[in-house]
Image (tube, helix red, strand yellow):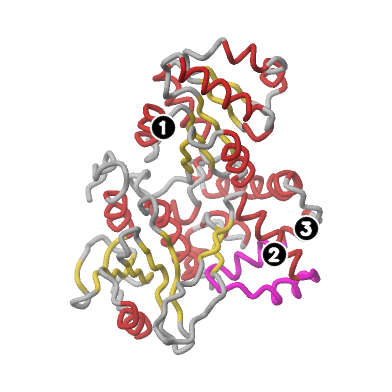
């Protein structure tokens, strides 16, 4: 089993607060992580997609009262929204009895629904974490395989590339036929697949809603709604533009990235390393892989943007920390990375505290007095050190 980077933080939160809400895409490993943590804490587990477990909660208050002395894990909790007010009551009852932490671990795969329900009923009682697919701090070797196959555990760990590709194709079919319709989507699965395939071809490009809508024969409002669904299901990231007051004409549309590189490749029929390297999407795919993984480990409160002016100044990823400090990142796939002219122009505009070029090599070194070339895992480790885990290196990794 691959040790998940989030596990120590999840265990710490359970020691601090009564309810932890763990969200993330389907098949990302939430249940596996929860059961691993629950094993240490003698937790009681219920899967709310199971008819048998749902039946146990026909008299939910009476049933859950019997477990106020143990951690209870409720999987796919958004399937029973009526539980949230009851959980608030039970948390308050346990607090009065002197138990103030580690009561419930709630798992969900639909971001806004779980957050809304928990926020309304459990305000001041819950802490939120997102489990993402496997990343370069969790996979001790095989960065190229991680990029090709993506980070969903069953895809990454498949015996060969062919089985990995088939798993991702089946995964996408489940989302097209079940998950998106469950949110209210009524478009045919084939239209949704065309939308996803277009997004894969346009990986890392700025949103042109009229272009997407025209290609699909839909109106812009409909396409915008389905982009929202993809964001809510943890499949799509909208990276916003940075609105700096620098007296320049700025690009104002967000950039779109499918969050898992393996899904990008599955949508484009890229099943092996040689096909990836020869495909026109290779540069954009690497950029999306880097951007997504850096955002996963950015400390709480840090925000990610891109910066682009109409004159050509550009930063692929601009990290804005709560302190106001800026880190600028350019992504290059070359083993001899050189910052572009547009990157230097952007640095002059924004004057960030640190600037990096992420490349697929193994050493960190200065390429200019202001810019460091750095491998992705090393920059991720630097960001991870800034977070709530107190600067401890992830097991098996060196900073």
- Determine which residue is flagged by label 1: 1
160 over 88 or under it: above or below: below
375 relative to 144 in the view: left or right: left
Is 158 or 331 nearer to us in this picture? Answer: 331
Is 81 or 259 nearer to us in this picture? Answer: 81
Q: Residue at x 53, y 24 (%)?
A: 73
Front tag of 2 and 1: 2
Relative image position of residue 246 (x, y in whole percent): 39, 83
Count of numbered circles on the image? 3
Is 338 or 351 nearer to us in this picture? Answer: 351
Task: Single out the residue that lies furthest toward the front.
Answer: 96
Relative image position of residue 185 (x, y in whole percent): 77, 52
55 relative to 34 in the view: left or right: right
Q: Can residue 237 be seen at all in this image of the molecule?
A: yes
Q: Does residue 33 show up magenta in the picture?
A: no
Q: Contact, CB < 8 Å: mark 2 with mark 1?
A: no
195 over 97 or under it: above or below: below
Q: Residue at x 45, y 14 (%)?
A: 97
243 over 303 or under it: above or below: below
Q: CA distance from mark 1 to mark 3?
A: 36 Å
Classify mark 2: residues with Cα within 10 Å, few (<14), some (14-19) or many (20+). Answer: some
Q: CA distance from mark 3 to mark 2?
A: 17 Å
Which quadrant would the N terminus be assigned to in this image?
Answer: top left
Question: Hey, which quadrant is residue 199 in on the image?
Answer: bottom right
Q: Residue at x 73, y 58 (%)?
A: 192
Q: Can residue 265 be seen at all in this image of the molecule?
A: no
Is 266 or 383 nearer to us in this picture? Answer: 383
């Amino acid at each position: 089993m691959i040790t998940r980077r989030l596990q120590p933080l999840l265990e710490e939160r359970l020691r601090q607060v009564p309810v932890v809400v763990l969200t993330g895409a389907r098949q990302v490993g939430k249940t596996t992580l929860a059961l691993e943590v629950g094993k240490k804490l003698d937790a009681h587990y219920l899967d709310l997609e199971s008819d048998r477990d749902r039946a146990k909660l026909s008299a939910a208050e009476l049933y859950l009262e019997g477990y106020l002395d143990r951690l209870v894990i409720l999987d796919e909790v958004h399937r029973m929204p009526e539980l949230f007010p009851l959980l608030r009551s039970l948390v308050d009852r346990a607090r009065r009895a002197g138990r103030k932490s580690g009561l419930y671990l709630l798992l969900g795969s639909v971001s806004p629904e779980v957050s809304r329900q928990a926020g309304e009923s459990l305000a001041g009682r819950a802490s939120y974490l997102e489990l993402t697919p496997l990343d370069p701090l969790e996979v001790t070797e095989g960065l190229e395989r991680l990029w090709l196959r993506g980070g969903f555990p069953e895809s990454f760990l498949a015996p060969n590339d062919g089985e990995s590709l088939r798993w991702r194709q089946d995964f996408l079919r489940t989302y097209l036929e079940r998950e998106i319709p469950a949110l209210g989507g009524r478009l045919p699965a084939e239209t949704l697949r065309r939308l996803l395939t277009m997004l894969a071809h346009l990986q890392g490009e700025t949103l042109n809603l009229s272009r997407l809508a025209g290609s699909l024969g839909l109106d812009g409002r409909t396409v915008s709604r389905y982009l929202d669904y993809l964001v809510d299901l943890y499949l799509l990231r909208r990276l916003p533009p940075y609105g700096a007051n620098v007296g320049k004409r700025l690009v104002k549309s967000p950039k779109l990235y499918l969050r898992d590189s393996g899904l990008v490749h599955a949508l484009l029929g890229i099943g092996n390393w040689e096909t990836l390297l020869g495909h026109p999407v290779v540069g954009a795919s690497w950029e999306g892989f880097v951007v997504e993984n850096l955002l996963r480990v950015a400390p709480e409160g840090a925000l990610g943007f891109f910066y682009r002016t109409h004159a050509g100044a550009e930063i692929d990823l601009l990290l804005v920390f709560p302190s106001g400090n800026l880190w600028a990142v350019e992504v290059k796939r070359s083993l001899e990375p050189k910052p572009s002219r547009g990157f230097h122009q952007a640095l002059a505009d924004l004057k960030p505290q640190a600037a990096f070029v992420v490349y697929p090599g193994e050493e960190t070194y200065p390429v200019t007095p202001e810019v460091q070339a750095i491998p992705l895992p090393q920059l991720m480790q630097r960001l991870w050190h800034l977070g709530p885990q107190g600067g401890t290196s992830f097991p098996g990794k060196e900073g």
